[in-house]
Image (cartoon, rainbow, N blue to C red):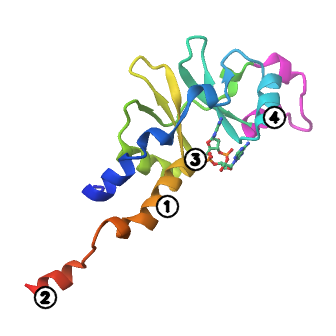
Amino acid sequence: MIGKEIGEMLLENQENFLIPAEMVAHVQVNNHLDHALLVLTKVGYSVIPVLDHEYKIKGLISMPMIIDAIMGLEKFDYDKLSDTCVHEVMQTDFATINNPYDLEEVLHLLVNHAFICVASEDGSFTGIVTRSEILKGTNRIAHEFENEFDVIKKENMKKSH
Ligand code: 2BA
């Protein structure tokens, strides 16, 4: 469990951790792979969310998923880029959390994922929480904790009683 004081310091920044949906690059389930390739290349991110027409999060797409889908035995089949939809190749097992989200759960998930998708109760995409936003918050605590608190090692406390 996260310690009380550290937890409260982290929570002071909780709203800054979320990159809102309108700032997140994404593609739609029915977009073709050539469009997804274009978006991934232009935005520079390695993996981005895939949404449906109701703005619900359905999967993740990355450059390797696209390359793998067009790879034949001996050469690439470039026609597949315009013949295949994103939903046919996207990753569907991925971590999603509901807003308001539990910070402790997010910290655990970010050990293995670069970002976590956040959805509202009805499944609508709210945004993402990324490793770097959380690291910025923990970096602040690492620098400021001892400016705000006197820290005494427990074994030293026992000796003084
Ligand atoms: P990656 O694309 O693998 O990016 C890893 C890290 O590289 C990012 O970490 C960021 O620090 C940096 N980076 C990569 N491309 C960047 C760019 N175009 N502009 C600025 N920085 C860039 P995080 O920021 O922690 O992001 C973690 C992951 O979350 C990213 O992994 C990406 O998959 C996703 N992501 C972050 N912001 C996004 C956004 N606005 N739209 C879509 N996906 C995003």
Q: For the residue carrying disc 3, how many other residues have a C-alpha within 10 Å: few (<14), some (14-19), or many (20+)?
A: few
Query: In terms of image quadrants, where is residue 142?
Result: bottom left
Asked if residue 81 lies left or right of residue 24, the reply is right
Q: Residue at x 25, y 79 (%)?
A: 153
Magenta stretch encompasses residue 81: yes
* Number of the label disc, if any, that sits on residue 159: 2
Which of the two residues, 76 or 126, is positioned nearer the viewer here? Answer: 126
Q: Which residues are magenta?
A: 63-84
Asked if residue 78 lies left or right of residue 148, the reply is right
**Relative image position of residue 159 (x, y in whole percent):** 13, 88
- Disc 2 residue lies near ligand 1 with CB under 8 A: no
Q: Residue furthest bottom?
A: 159
Q: Residue furthest left?
A: 161
Lower sequence index among marks 1 and 2: 1
Lower sequence index among marks 4 and 2: 4
Say which residue label 1 marks: 139
Q: Secondary structure at mark 3?
A: loop
Q: Residue at x 54, y 23 (%)?
A: 57
Q: Is residue 126 above or below residue 40?
A: above
Say which residue label 3 marks: 114
Q: For the residue carrying disc 4, how many other residues have a C-alpha within 10 Å: few (<14), some (14-19), or many (20+)?
A: few
Magenta stretch encompasses residue 101: no
- Disc 3 residue lies near ligand 1 with CB under 8 A: yes
**Relative image position of residue 148 (x, y in whole percent):** 33, 65
| Amino acid type, mark 4 | Lys
**Relative image position of residue 37 (x, y in whole percent):** 80, 30
